[in-house]
Image (tube, rainbow, N blue to C red):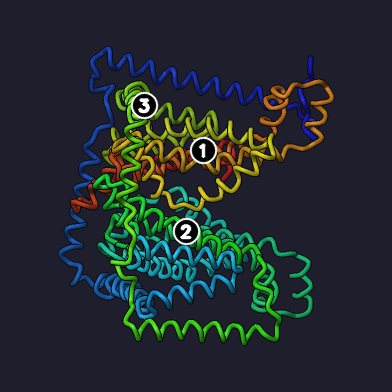
Amino acid sequence: MTQPARTPSGAATGDGEGVWRRSWFQALVVLAVLVAGYWVSRTAGHPSWAGGFPTGIGDSFMAWLDGIYAWIVQNRNDSPLFLYFFNYVSVGLGSAVVLINQALDALTWVGVTALGVLSAWRAAGWRVALLVLATFGVFALTGLWNASMTTLALIITSVFIALLFGLPLGILAGRSERFHRRLRPALDFMQIMPAFAYLLPFVLLFGIGNPAAAVITAVYALPPVVRITALALREVDRGAIEATTSLGSTPWQVLTKVQLPLAKRTILLGINQTIMLAVSMVVIASVIGAGGLGDAIFQALSKVNVGQAFQAGLAIVMLAIAMDRVTGAVGNGAHTPRVPERLRLPVLGGGLLAVLATVVIGRSFDLGGWPRNWAVDIAAPVNAVNDAIESAVGGATSAMGTWTLEWVLAPLSQVLTGSPWWLVVLVAAALGWIFGGVRVAVLSAGSFVLVGLLGVWDNAMDTLSQVLVASLLTLALGVVLGVLMSRNDVFATILRPVLDAMQTLPPFVYLIPAVALFGIGRVPALAAAVIFALPPVIRLVNDGIRGVPAGAVEAADSQGSTKWQMLTKVQLPLARGSLLLAVNQGIILVLSMVVMGALVGAGSLGFDVVFGLAQNQLGLGLASGLAIVGLGLFLDRLTQGRRASHA
């Protein structure tokens, strides 16, 4: 009989495994109590003491918010706060987007292409330059050149705002522990919030259109550059700082001459992450009238036109990949083209002259944007292929969707919405206590009470049921694929670039193939959520298992452990930290995507946000957005385990 493997510190993994099993047993008992409470309530005919959360407070809160919205609409041009601040900011941001868009138009399509290719070549080499050229080719040939330039102008404006505020905040957080501690909860909160939850508050302040889209995108993309800049400064070698300080350098000289140069590579990676988040959020901002490629997808999905959605989705995918490769190459320290130092300035000057020449030629021939009659319509053939696929597998996918709705989603939703609200709150608190301690228990109960007080209890529980189903499927597939990836280097080599590409895509794009396979409804939203959340889960499981100390593996192997025993008794227990992080990331990503599924008929909280935006019902939309935040906070803290209680 094999002995339990021991970690380098000498603690038996069996002890931790026993605690882990005991926690899961307690959780199952708590869930069984919830199911029993549902059946008792149902048998008793759902009496008032065992019903859903009272809606009185929520209705009053929504009415109050609607009153605020009405006041803002009536006083937007009279109130000093709007007249001298928000309106100025709105006009300034809208003008910035328009000016950048006009500048791109003035360069003409040949000038923009030449400038983009030259910049990509100088920053990342000829391969990335060819990718950028292909990207502009997709913009043109799909007939979406103007929409692509609008999206690009929004991204440039939003990233500039995010970096203008994010870099100084990151520097302050990196140099001051007190400031970092105070800023961290706000960053945590911002990263927990699904993208949809950002929409209504900023629409209230800045209205519908590009100004609100620019602010929302900038705020959504802000946390990575702040966090990574602070981390980069903190990781600068203390010896270099002490040596510079001992020579009499001022704090400003230490920052500019030592810390920032040594942290440059990591900070550039933070800028890369900010740009990628901006790309994804700009697409989502089409819901509030931002225009561009996101609006093209939104309109196509609303008409269930897979071909048109595919065209716009392809343009967004190419834009995201191109921007990721260019900024990632700079952040990773990729080698620029090997040009002798004495020729760098002439080569750069010659390239700029070539760009200027193309602009002059383009302006001479009045080219402007790419002519729409030169575009290649691929919507019809894509729709034909989609129809063929639907004919071949439509019956199977329809049956799968029906089964999922009737036997999985509906029962779970009925349990959550049909159980006494106070029992659901107690169950949330109990799960928080089991997995995170007293603080997480209090926060979990508070999150559910907040959801109830907002007046959207039933829709929130329905959204939670969708998140749980998609999360279980995501984690099951992610663990299996992650284990296979960790055990087979060939499979890992094949899968790694696929995961890279998947993590580059904006979440909006995942709705297109889901709608193509499952049509409109909750099932495509769940399918898109699963695929969207899979890559980080697979990566974290793979990294966790590969990071298990070799000594522990060799010790277990020498005692005759089978591969299954090695995995379940040694590798998975020792990789528990990575597994918990995988669970956390997977569930939070699923929540954000399930909410976005409202655009394809998923309903619940996401639909309430979209409906509130469309019908100017601020109360319903903002209450639903806050409820999404409450669910996100609960799921995040619960899946962080004991770490959350000490955060």
Q: Label 1: how many residues lie within 10 Å, few (<14), some (14-19) or many (20+)? A: some
Q: In the rendered structure, are the residues bearing label 3 and label 2 in contact, judged by CB atoms less than 8 Å apart?
A: no
- Which tag, 3 or 1, sits closer to the chain's start? 3
Residue 603 shown left or right of residue 266 in the figure? left
Report the amino acid beneath label 1: Arg
| Residue 595 position within the rendered picture, expressed as x and y whole percent measured from the top left | 35, 43
Residue at 19% x, 53% y is 616
Q: Residue 493 at what x, y percent from top left? A: 65, 44
579 vs 353, nearest the viewer:
353
- Residue farthest right in this picture: 558
Q: Quadrant of the N terminus?
A: top right
Question: Which of the two labelled residues, at mark 2 and mark 1, occupies the earlier sequence position?
Answer: 2
Q: Quadrant of the C terminus?
A: top right
Q: Is residue 530 above or below residue 62?
A: above
Count residues near mark 2 (Cα–Cα under 10 Å), then give few for <14, some for 14-19, many for 20+: many
Which numbered disc covers residue 439? 1
Helix, strand or loop at disc 2? Answer: helix
Is residue 71 shown to the viewer in this render? yes
| Mark seen at residue 396 | 3
Secondary structure type for disc 3: helix
